[in-house]
Amino acid sequence: MSVTSEIVKDFKNFIKKKGLKYTSEREEILKEILKSKQHFDVDELYMKLRKKGSKVSKASVYRTIPLLVEAGYIQEVYKQDSRSYYEVTLDKLPHIHFICIKCKSVDEIIDDYLAERIQEEAKNKNYTPLTYHLEIFGICHKCKKGV
Amino acid sequence: MSVTSEIVKDFKNFIKKKGLKYTSEREEILKEILKSKQHFDVDELYMKLRKKGSKVSKASVYRTIPLLVEAGYIQEVYKQDSRSYYEVTLDKLPHIHFICIKCKSVDEIIDDYLAERIQEEAKNKNYTPLTYHLEIFGICHKCKKGV
DNA sequence: TTTAATCTTGAGAATAAGTTTCAAATTAAA
DNA sequence: TTTAATTTGAAACTTATTCTCAAGATTAAA
């Protein structure tokens, strides 16, 4: 069984367990998202669906995203200009973004140790952590050299 | 000379260097912000100013904030419900925010080890780190118990 | 101190992401 | 099927932030 159909099956379960109804719109949106290899926002996702001939509405996209976040398939990675960007989580750990304040480039790393420490800190505070954003603002190598 | 008047003097210099004009509105806003001991958003700041009898407009508050960020006196610390929250930078270490997605409460800690590790990671990537945002989203103790 | 050029202001209109409303359509259980 | 409950699309709504513009303030020079 493919990874995608495995996830689709799990999502159906998740929806049912919540006493909700499994609809073709929800499945379409999930499947489209699983194809994305990069960050995406609602508009991009909606446009991709429309171009494929899907009749799904933007409202449904907005309504489905929180479900997918709750189910753990996607996470919000950053906000920019009052727009939220998401990405597929899968088993990827939330990662660190380095944002250069000069050239606006975004680089990323995954630091397992840091991830663990963050989980610990959350638990010390009696929080049930779901996800996190770590953005480091600074100046990248290229800009420092004046490239 | 007090810390506040020192900053006010520096800000005036900053404004002049940029070829802008130093106005009473800009000074009022800066002074009010310097009094804040906690996170604030534009609305809170605007309300505080109005209660004191200030005639400053919300538009001016919105226009002044980017200048204060650029000058380094304040920084955006997180966004919630499409609203930005700021705090006075001074020499405070960037800290971690725990944001409860249910009750919207924000708690914070400072973790020196985490701060160091973040600096290290940045240097490994050849970045010159200036500041960072670490936001952990989850469910707080109270909400988990259903209070 | 007057002038003139430029910038900033307040008020309200505009913008745009995200949410809500509601009638019609779909789902799911009996 | 029948029926109750949920979901959908479309459009209206909400709300933070930005923009517009005429009137007022600041600045440097005369």
Image: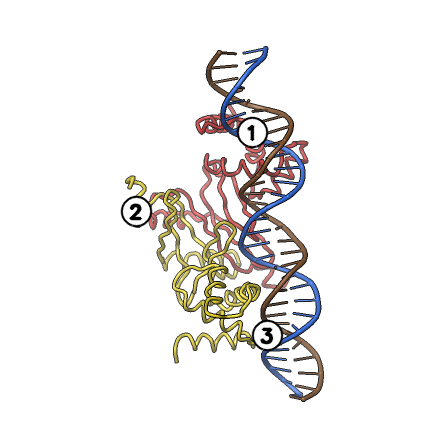
Chain colours: A yellow, B red, C blue, D brown
Quarter of the rendering occupied by the N terminus of chain A: bottom left
Residue shown at the point (45%, 51%) measured from the top left: B134
In the rendered image, which residue does mark 1 sit on? B27
Looking at the image, is mark 2 or mark 1 earlier in the sequence?
A: 1
Q: Are the residues tagged 2 and 1 within 8 Å (C-beta)?
A: no
Residue type of the residue flagged with mark 3:
Leu
Look at mark 3 in the image and give the residue it sits on. Answer: A20
Q: Could you tell me which chain the residue with mark 2 belongs to?
A: B
| B90 displayed left or right of D24 | left
Residue at mark 2 to residue at mark 3: CA–CA distance? 48 Å
Q: Position of residue A45 (x, y in %)?
A: 47, 63
A44 lies left or right of C1: left
Label 3: which secondary element: loop
Question: Which residue was labeled with disc 2?
Answer: B126
The chain letter under disc 1 is B
Position of residue C30 relative to residue B30, above or below, is below
| Marks 3, 1 in one chain | no
Q: Residues within 10 Å of mark 3 (few under 14, many from 20)?
A: few
Residue A28 percent across, percent down from the top left: 49, 72
